[in-house]
Image (cartoon, rainbow, N blue to C red):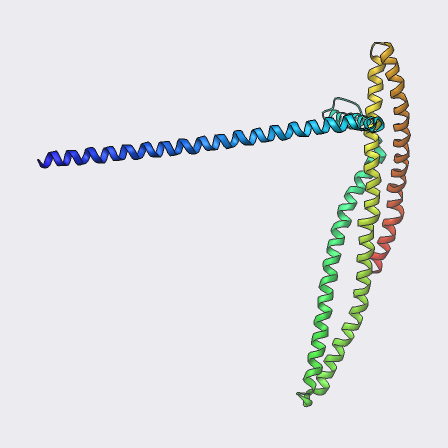
Amino acid sequence: TLEMVEGQSLEAVSAASFTARQDLTKEMLAQRLSSVLQIVSRQNEYIIHSEKQTLQLKSECLTMEPPKLEQIKKWTVQNYKFTKQLVSEKFGHTTKTVDKDLDDRIEELRASKIQYGNMLREARVMYARFEALLTTHRNIRAQFQSLISHAPELQDQLQANATTQSILEKNGEGLLGAIKTFVDSLNTLVNVTIQDTFLTIKNYENARIEYDAYRNDIVTLETAPQTEANKNKLLELQVIFENRKQKWEKLKRDTNTKTGSFGRKQVDGNEVTVGNV
């Protein structure tokens, strides 16, 4: 009888365990199904949103005035040519115009910018530390003067020390002013003069890429079959090419002027200030 009871108990426990496992499996399946449905729902929302944006863009393009459409078309073509030329140059699939002398000066200027930037950072640290040192001299002088009333027998020594700290403070203020002038001049050089020069350099490099892009397009068309369409396209490209060439040559002259004058004038002027400090 005892064995029968124990067997029934084991069967009941096994049945209960099996039922629990079934419930757990159902719950896990339900959670996974819910997750899948959520993902599908998000995908549908994204698709619907994308379709709405596409329809809105099409509607805007249809209602847009022809001149604006033409501007967008030109902007797209120019960006495509620019990106294509840049990528082709990176992989060595096309030629580019090189001015070795100017490129070397630009690289030297980049190196100088880093060095002057480091100098500016150290000069600011020097100014802050020297200013803190003057504050210390000022506080020590005040302490010596305060001690005179508490120790009359040491009045002469305390007054002499206070006077020394006052002299150090006064001379230090003059040097601190010179350091501040140096920091301000260096800041103008790094964040105004050099920054303006590099803005010109950036415009020059972009103009050079556009110039080379149209130049390579013309070379490609000149070697293509001389059909009527190609001839007309070549004439259009030559007009645009001449415009890009003039822009590039002007920016090249500006870059030559700024990189050359930077080395001869701006830097020398700031080096005089450094020498004075």
Q: Residue drawn 78% across and 46% down?
A: 113
Image quadrant for the N terminus? top left
Q: Is residue 85 visible?
A: no
Q: Residue drawn 35% across and 34% down?
A: 24
> 19 and 86: which one is in front?
19
* Vertical position of residue 125 compared to residue 114: above or below: below
* Vertical position of residue 195 compared to residue 14: above or below: below
Locate residue 23 relative to residue 46 in the image: left or right.
Answer: left
- Residue 157 position within the rendered picture, expressed as x and y whole percent measured from the top left: 71, 84
- Residue 179 position within the rendered picture, expressed as x and y whole percent measured from the top left: 79, 61
Locate residue 94 relative to residue 253 in the image: left or right.
Answer: left
Farthest left residue in view: 1
Locate residue 13 relative to residue 164 in the image: left or right.
Answer: left
Residue 80, by quadrant, is: top right
> 176 and 33: which one is in front?
33
* Vertical position of residue 30 compared to residue 176: above or below: above
Q: Is residue 208 visible?
A: yes
> 74 and 238: which one is in front?
74
Image quadrant for the C terminus? bottom right
